[in-house]
Image (spheres, rainbow, N blue to C red):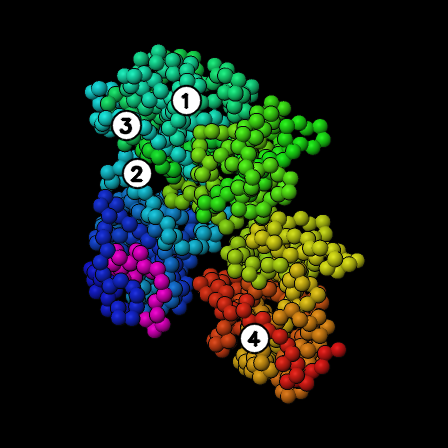
Amino acid sequence: MPKTSSTSGLERYKAKRNFAITPEPSEGGQSKAGALQFVIQKHWASRLHYDFRLELEGTMKSWAVPKGPSYDPKDKRMAVHVEDHPISYNTFEGQIPEKQYGAGKVIIWDKGYWIPLEDPVKGYKAGKLKFEMHGHKMHGHWALVRIRSRTDKQDAWLLIKEHDSLIKPASEFSLVDELPDSVASLPMPELPGASKKTARKPAVAKKSAAVSKNGLPADAVKASMPDKLSPVLATLVDGPPANADDWIFEIKFDGYRMLTRIDKAGVKLFTRNGHDWTSKVQHLADAIASMKLKPGWLDGEIVVLGEKGGTDFQALQNAFQRGRTSSIVYFLFDVPFYAGHDLRGVQLIERREFLDGLLNEAPEGIRFSETFDAPPRDIVLSACKLGLEGVIGKKKESLYGSGSRSPDWIKLKCTQRQEFVIGGYTDPKGGRVGMGSILVGVHNEAGELVYAGSVGSGFTDKSLAATLEKLQALGAKKSPFSTTTENDRRAHWVEPKLLAEVSFSEWTKDQHIRHPVFHGLRSDKPAKKIIREEPTHMTGPDVEEKSKIPAKLKISNPERVIDPSTGITKIEVVRFYALVADLMMEHLKGRPVSLVRAPSGIKGQLFFQKHLESYKMAGIEQLDPAIHPGHDQYIAVAKPEGLLSAAQMNVIEFHTWNTVKSSIAKPDRMTFDMDPGEGVEWKTMQQATELVRVFLTQLGLVSFVKTSGGKGMHVVVPLKRQHGWDTVKDFSQAIVIHLARTLPQLFVAKLGPKNRVGKIFIDYLRNGFGSTTAAAWSARARPGLGVSVPITWEEVQTISSGAHWHLKNIHTRLDKGNLPWADYGKSAQPLGTAMKKLGFKPD
């Protein structure tokens, strides 16, 4: 075995590092009982790579994987075996200083546990490891296989995705492109349940739960029953879990959560907040009493069934208002206590099986909440088509965490819907009676009631009258909202005590709800606890990690080759813009843009597009026609998704104006496009770029620089919005003419290829009204697909060309991002002094 084997322990690791300088740990770290850890660190060293580390025999066995993992089994990734690292290295994230071994930025790209599928010590020595991964991004079966090295210096292996249900073609999904960020702030995933080496039970369905001699689940423990019980609550999420076999799915009932206590005194029913509602649903209490159950707590939801098989919250409200509650049905789904035993530590599937047995001969009105045997996405789709509120998912092995909002119980809603606090109402208009609409809000983190909008739809004549009666009893002299409303002058204010259940389509930019519909009043929750519900994105082995490319964006012809010189395809261009979208939006926000489209690839005809024309792209907005009267509306990228929808429409380049839409008549920057003619060497371009900066500094102007993504460089001067387009353009021309006269052997101020042979044309024409320049982070429609990247002035002498970064290596620059231009936003400057120094007099 080569010297890089574990026989050297941590000696080689320590020998390579000066721990007085590097923040890396020297040793230590704890192995977790019953589990083996893994970490994958994204490392921007001399070259970007992914450090793949598996815990084994007290250290982290380590491989450097240049391209990172792939879910496509065809992608056999090179993995160079390197020295062992201490277990404490699993938590390292930071900057290794210059001149130190491995100098560069390190992030924790993924972490979790791994399960050897064969003897790992023998496999490691033999050069063949097969294992199962349980991380935030890495799941399923993988293999590391040693291959023969071409030299004795490398111990080369291959990292391969084994065939299982999780494989994905590289043309459809790129793990490192679509999930590039750190997971350091996330908790470790749960210990996997599939390993024979762990104490956890496997998260799979059981045909029959283990029972003790008294007929209870085997894991039930003797305990006195509490007087009160807070139910486990579900977490709102934005998508179903990936490992559906580990979960069960039930209908999300549109009713009231209800807990039942059975003891010697009888049967009592309580709301989730502990209010005794027994007298309101006496028929349900009587039905449960007739079952002769032993003392315990039952958990479920009361509902009124609708005509189409769903549940009807409005009908439930009416039943209580009219005192006709016989139509209310009680669906039971859990049993946390029973017969002097605490079942909260019993797995859900065992609790459910036990509860199902208790309800074998349940009377009318008491039902067991059934589950559905189908893919979760299909269940949600079917529930939505039936008009149901959504679906509840529960992990099969989950325990009952009283009073907590558990990630093991999730809710997937068909539409956005939640409770709001009513703070006022308006008078009716037209033929409406009672009131016009209710004014609702939610509490922010500071505890203030923030206005969220008015709700006028969904009321019946009876619900209008009933709601008005209750609101009039809560009249107040001033608004309870911390923010203003559009109805301040005509509103009737009330004490913020009453809750309304409201569905809506979305939240607007000003934090108001769109298309709200009233479903009823609620009294089972305290008003002070009503906040805006935000869906959580699940992480860990139970979730399909959310790609930076939205699922709703359909990419046509993803394999179409855009650049024949490199083989770069359309899907790679889309992934690139998903990767840089957040960085790029800083340079796009509010600016009119022009798009360069390449429907047939960069070798085909290119189209320059300034208007939407017949194309509609999500995230691309049309600007006010007043910007340029008599012309079609200009466009801007309003959201990151605009970059992706444009890339789907074969857009390669994004060019921006030197102004923003709110101040279209006055530019806020001046741009100099350094364009080399035939025969200009790169070192000459570097020298010329520096000279432009020196001259601008002499004029008192601060400037910034970026690669063009093509042959040249872009020098940008941020401006205060004081002058019009003509003045800024004329002044930029005066600067270029001065440079050309001073250094005629280097610069030319005249446009045209013949004029710039062996020289550099500084393009000042970019500063005219409607003219544009390729934006920072835009790709260029040229062989190699270079990228325009912000850099520091010190880096000008270190880069190899204006296309130093391109689609194939842009990953190596993302750790720097926009930091080189960190001061740009506060550097806007007037031109008056510079004009005087140059002797320029504006018209």
Q: CA distance from mark 3 to mark 4?
A: 70 Å
What is the quadrant of residue 90 in the picture?
bottom left
Split into 4 quadrants, where in the image is the C terminus?
A: bottom right
Residue marked by disc 4: 703
- As for residue 95 lying within the magenta part, the answer is yes
Q: Nearer the viewer, mark 4 or mark 1?
A: 1
Q: Which residues are magenta?
A: 78-100
Which disc, if any, is residue 277? 1
Q: How far from the left and from the top, in percent, is residue 448?
A: 48, 45
Q: CA distance from mark 3 to mark 2?
A: 34 Å
Which disc, if any, is residue 226? 3
> Which amino acid, by three-letter code, is at mark 1?
Trp
Q: Secondary structure at mark 2?
A: loop
Q: Secondary structure at mark 3?
A: loop
The tag earlier along the polypeptide, 4 or 2, is 2
Q: Nearer the viewer, mark 2 or mark 1?
A: 1
Which disc, if any, is residue 194? 2
Q: CA distance from mark 3 to mark 1?
A: 18 Å
Q: Is residue 534 left or right of residue 149?
A: right
> Which amino acid, by three-letter code, is at mark 2?
Ala
For this rendering, which residue is in front, 725 or 781?
Answer: 725
Q: Nearer the viewer, mark 3 or mark 4?
A: 3
Q: Secondary structure at mark 4?
A: loop
> Which amino acid, by three-letter code, is at mark 3?
Pro
Q: Secondary structure at mark 1?
A: loop
Q: How far from the left and from the top, in percent, is residue 230?
A: 35, 31
Asked if the residue at tag 2 contacts the one at tag 3, i.e. Cβ–Cβ closer than 8 Å, the answer is no
For the point 38% across and 64% down, the residue is: 105
For this rendering, which residue is in front, 101 or 22?
Answer: 22
